[in-house]
Image (cartoon, helix red, strand yellow):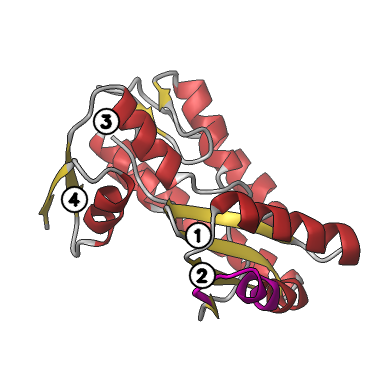
Amino acid sequence: MAGHSLGEFSALVANHVLHFEDALKLVSIRAQAMQKACEIQPSTMAAVLALADDKVEEICAAITAETGEVVVAANYNCPGQLVISGSLKGIEIACERMKAAGAKRALVLPVGGAFHSPLMAPAKEELAAAIEATHFNNPICPVYQNVVAKAVTDPSAIKQNLIDQLTGAVRWTQSVQAMVADGASHFTEVGPGKVLQGLVQKIHREAIVDGVS
């Protein structure tokens, strides 16, 4: 099992790691802590289309080194679709440089903060305390977590990866690739919509996908 960003909590409930009520409490605490972090420093995210992941990473690192502005790769959604996260100025500079480097689009997203970036660090302590105080069961099958993009079964490791996800990247492309390498060929998206089905097919064209809403 796997979940994209917030969806990782849903995956952990489905995997019997978390009780539904405990997951709701953690999601609420996470949201409130992230909101506080957003208020400390205005920040945002932007979608970058049709530019290689390593080029996006290179541009982000160069901007941070030159200007001190925070800009990082935040969501590796599929090849050619990456979301970056950072300060308002950093994202503004990044969008111009991404387009100059050949990106088809570099579009600022209507979000209230730089999620999955170091700018969420102020929220980490509160979320970590809540997660550590919550009982996590052994999963019924491996969960491929966003920040490590590999199979995890140890509850203590699952906790730490969930904490690290707040400031770390959602490595969805790498997670799907790891699942395929481990033998997965049929992916079922649980929930409304077909976004993840589309991403999976872009990551692995031979994948069989369906959904349960």
Q: Are marks 3 and 1 in contact (CB under 8 Å)?
A: no
Identify which amino acid the numbered label 3 is placed on. Answer: His
Which image quarter is the C terminus in? bottom left
Q: Residues within 10 Å of mark 4 (few under 14, many from 20)?
A: some
Q: Position of residue 186 (x, y in %)?
A: 15, 37
The circle drawn on residue 190 is 4
Counting residues from the start of the chain, the first of labels 1 and 4 encountered is: 1
Per the model, the C-alpha gap separating discs 2 and 1 is: 6 Å
Name the residue that disc number 2 marks. Answer: 47
Q: Is residue 175 left or right of residue 84?
A: left
Counting residues from the start of the chain, the first of labels 2 and 3 encountered is: 3
Q: Residues within 10 Å of mark 3 (few under 14, many from 20)?
A: some
Identify which amino acid the numbered label 2 is placed on. Answer: Ala
Per the model, the C-alpha gap separating discs 3 and 1 is: 31 Å
The circle drawn on residue 16 is 3
* Comparing labels 3 and 1, the label whose residue is closer to the camera: 1
Counting residues from the start of the chain, the first of labels 3 and 1 encountered is: 3
Q: Are marks 2 and 1 in contact (CB under 8 Å)?
A: yes
Depth check, front residue: 51 or 45: 51
Depth check, front residue: 142 or 68: 68
Q: Residues within 10 Å of mark 2 (few under 14, many from 20)?
A: some
Counting residues from the start of the chain, the first of labels 2 and 1 encountered is: 2
The circle drawn on residue 54 is none
Q: Residues within 10 Å of mark 1 (few under 14, many from 20)?
A: many
Q: From the viewer's perspective, is residue 48 above or below residue 78?
A: below
What residue do we see at 64% from left, 68% from top? 101
**Residues rendered magenta in the picture:** 95-105
Q: Position of residue 49 (x, y in %)?
A: 48, 68
Name the residue that disc number 1 marks. Answer: 82
* Comparing labels 3 and 4, the label whose residue is closer to the camera: 4
Q: Are marks 2 and 3 in contact (CB under 8 Å)?
A: no
